[in-house]
Structures are given as C-alpha cells and as structure tokens.
Amino acid sequence: MRTQVAIIGAGPSGLLLGQLLHKAGIDAVIVERQSPDYVLGRIRAGVLEQVATDLLDEAGVGERMHREGLVHTGFDMLFNGQRHRVDLERLTGGKKVMVYGQTEVTRDLMAARAAAGLPTVYEAANVQVHGFDSTAPYVTYDKDGQSQRIDCDFIAGCDGFHGVCRASVPRSAIKEFEKVYPFGWLGLLSDTPPVHHELIYANSPRGFALCSQRSHTRSRYYLQVPLTDKVEQWSDDAFWAELKLRLDPEAAEKLVSGPSIEKSIAPLRSFVTEPLRFGRLFLAGDAGHIVPPTGAKGLNLAATDVKYLSNALTEFYAEKSEAGINHYSEKCLKRIWRAERFSWWFTSIMHRFNDDPIMGKLQEAELDYLMHSEAGLKTIAENYVGLPLDFGGR
Ligand code: RFL
Ligand code: PHB
C-alpha cells in the first residue's frame, strides 16, 4: 500500500489530522493498535477550548457538538469551605469553553472518516516505523496473521504517551523533560445530574476534588488519591462519601449519587519531548507531551499540534515549500510550554502535596489573593480558555 501520510494512532490527534488532511486533498492511512470499541471506551477529557471547537468545525465534525455540548462561561474554585466563581466570559472579553466529552469527539471523527470512505486499519499488531531519516519512510504491521507495509512520504506519530513512534527515535536525537506527581486522580462517571451547572475545582484539607459533567444527566467526578491506591479499593459508596467530605455544605447537600458507569485511576505527569520532528517523522498530541489534567489542556494541545501539522503538510504539497515542516516543532513547543506551565501551576495550587500544615496555609493564602485580585482572576481565566492558534508567530 502507498499513501502520502501514514498516521499512527486513531485517538483524537490521529483522527483529526486525518480529517484536516482529507479536507486539504492529502491522502492518509491511519493504523491503530486497538479496536474502535476499545478506543471509544476510554473516558478522558471533557473541556474544549474555543480554538479546539473551531478546529472541529473546520474538520466538518462540529454539528453534534454544537447541538449537544454545553457552553460554559465560568467555573467555581472552592477552598477554605467557600466557593468563588471565575467568570471566564467577563475576564477574557467574551471567551467560553465547551463541555463535550472526548469520547463524543472521537465518535464524531470516526463517523466522518467512515462516511468519507477513508482507510483506517484497526487492531494492527506489532506496528513499526522505518526510514524516517530518508525521503522514503514506511510503516509495517501485522493484521490477521499477515505482515503488511505502507510506503509514504511522512509519518505522523499520533500514538499517545505509550506509542511506538517516540520510542523509535534514537535516544541521542531526543530530549525528554518529565515530572511525575505524587498522587493520581480517581475518576467516576455516573448517570446522575451534575451537582452544579458549572465545574467545581476544590482544594480541601482532604485533597483535591473536581465536579465535572458530560450532560445534564451525566456527571464526571474526580478525587486526588495516593498513587498506591488501587481502583478495586474504592467502592462507589466510598467514592461518594469522600467526595461529599471535600465539598462545601451546599454542594455536599445537593450531590446526587448513583452507580458508577466507569471508574479508573490516572497518574499525573508533566512531560515534554524536544524536538517534535525527526526527519520525516512528526510527533503530535500525547505522543510528544503530557500535562496533568487539572488545566484541561491535553486534548486541546493535541488539536492545535495537529492543526500546525496539517498546515505544514499542506504547504509542502501545495507550494513545494519545506518552511512549514521545518518550523513545526518550534511552533508547537512554544504553545506547549505555556500550557505545561499553567497545568503545573494550577495542579500545584489545587492539590495537597504532603501533611506539612504551613504548605496548606500558604496555598489558601495564594488562592485567597487570586480570588480577590482582578489580575489574579484574569491570569487563571486567560490561561483556562487557552491561547490563540497564532500565538508565538510563525
Ligand atoms: P491518545 O488519546 O492516547 O490516542 C493515541 C492512540 O494511539 C494508539 N496507539 C497505537 N496505535 C498503533 N500502534 C501503536 N504502537 C500504538 N500505541 C498507541 C492508542 O491505542 C490510541 O488510540 O492520544 P491523542 O490522540 O494524542 O489524544 C490526547 C488526549 O487523549 C489527552 O491529551 C486528553 O485525554 C487529556 N485529558 C484532557 N484534555 C483536555 O484537553 N481536557 C480535559 O478535560 C482533559 N481531561 C485528560 C483529562 C486525560 C485524562 N487521563 C486519563 C490521563 C482527564 C483525564 C482523567
Ligand atoms: C473532565 O470532565 O473529564 C475534566 C474536566 C476538567 C478537567 C479535567 C477533566 O480539568
């Protein structure tokens, strides 16, 4: 088989790249290790920045999102027993975010790809990338016991943090920056009405909690838990009881509990790879960087990486210019580091790190300052709604 761009991974990065390239008239094949149901079963992000919703519109998959997604103009921060609203719309001159699950984004992208008859190979085993230091790279994999080969001009590594693409780059060519946090997030999804019409980020003496949602009838909640905790240790009842203890009395009173549809623990990590281009191989999304989920930036960064990459590849094919692909890494990394900084900082002020009482007091003082300063509120709001696509020039 031959194609122009071989995309590894059918998560949101790979699927959105496929769609943007298709719109630009560039052929691509997506090779994914898992089945479609497995990909759709991963419950992850819930908040989209305006830049990401614009990109989904550009890709022609925004219709259901606008119909079913929830536009949020603010969120609450809870500490010291009191809730404070961050009015995103007022503080950013009119910007908002969209609450629409990653699962739904993925479903919409998969449907558009199928409707356009574009090729995706699911359940591909032993995927390997070759020759990306030449102008004739290729991908090999096994499918139904047969080994297959795709020759291409470029390889897009959209295969997430545990993928094969980053792992195939010689160690001497790559620099990795990493911070692992000493706790994880235990997430629970349930068909219960959300406790509040907007999100609540809570810093309580018992640890962080987040009240999020997927619709008016489906809630997503998270608790900070020690890394040593196992999901089996947490019954639904234990989860609801702990969440109640981390909320203010009004929210605790309103909280509606119910059976979990999904429950899992995710570790928290800050991670960046430099560079993001190795000859004819590009890394995009979680393959190149990870943020702790507190700032809701991971999926949004994946979407903007992929936009830069599709622009660069379009420039290559349409104008025979390598300028775009030469600047891909630098352009992405500028935006990525800004989001990494915000995600790390927001994680630092919202979680409990150890039992040292002075640190808890200092966090409360910082939050108190931020909530009572227009500059403090603005710094949270403008980072939360996200940077414009053209941030940082070229
Ligand atoms: P994905 O989604 O991991 O997809 C990668 C795909 O590649 C496949 N793959 C391979 N395929 C072929 N060969 C191989 N060798 C392969 N190895 C892997 C995988 O099966 C998979 O299908 O990466 P992508 O596309 O870059 O998307 C990134 C996002 O998934 C991620 O950044 C977000 O989910 C992060 N995130 C959030 N981001 C936001 O913007 N807003 C949020 O509110 C938000 N909340 C979250 C989150 C992540 C979380 N977890 C679980 C870490 C909440 C949580 C709890
Ligand atoms: C989610 O709904 O899953 C979600 C929302 C906001 C975050 C992280 C996760 O910061």
Image (cartoon, grey):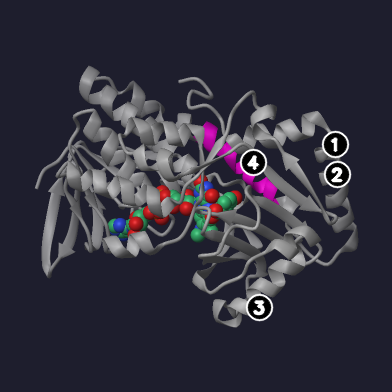
Mark toward the viewer: 2 or 4 = 2
Q: Nearer the viewer, mark 3 or mark 4?
A: 3
Q: Is mark 4 within 8 Å of ligand 2?
A: no
User: How far is the residue under mark 1 from the one under mark 4?
Assistant: 22 Å
Residue located at (54% from left, 44% from top): 297
User: How far separated are the C-alphas under marks 3 and 1?
Assistant: 35 Å
Q: x and y percent of residue 29 in the render?
A: 19, 46
Mark 2 vs mark 3: give the one in front: 3
- Which secondary structure class fits the magenta region best? helix
The CA distance from mark 3 to mark 4 is: 33 Å
- In the picture of the structure, the residue carrying the numbered disc 1 is 372
Callout 2 secondary element: helix
**In the rendered image, which residue does mark 2 sit on?**
368
Indicate which disc residue 341 carries: 4
Q: Residues within 10 Å of mark 4 (few under 14, many from 20)?
A: some
Q: Which one is earlier in the sequence, the residue at label 2 or at label 3? A: 3
Residue 84 position, x and y percent, is: 78, 44
On the image, numbered disc 3 is attached to which residue?
A: 238
Question: Is there CB contact under 8 Å for labels 1 and 2?
Answer: yes
Q: Which is more N-terminal, label 4 or label 1?
A: 4
Q: Are marks 2 and 4 in contact (CB under 8 Å)?
A: no
Which residues are drawn in magenta? 333-347
Which percent across, then down, holds residue 161? 44, 55
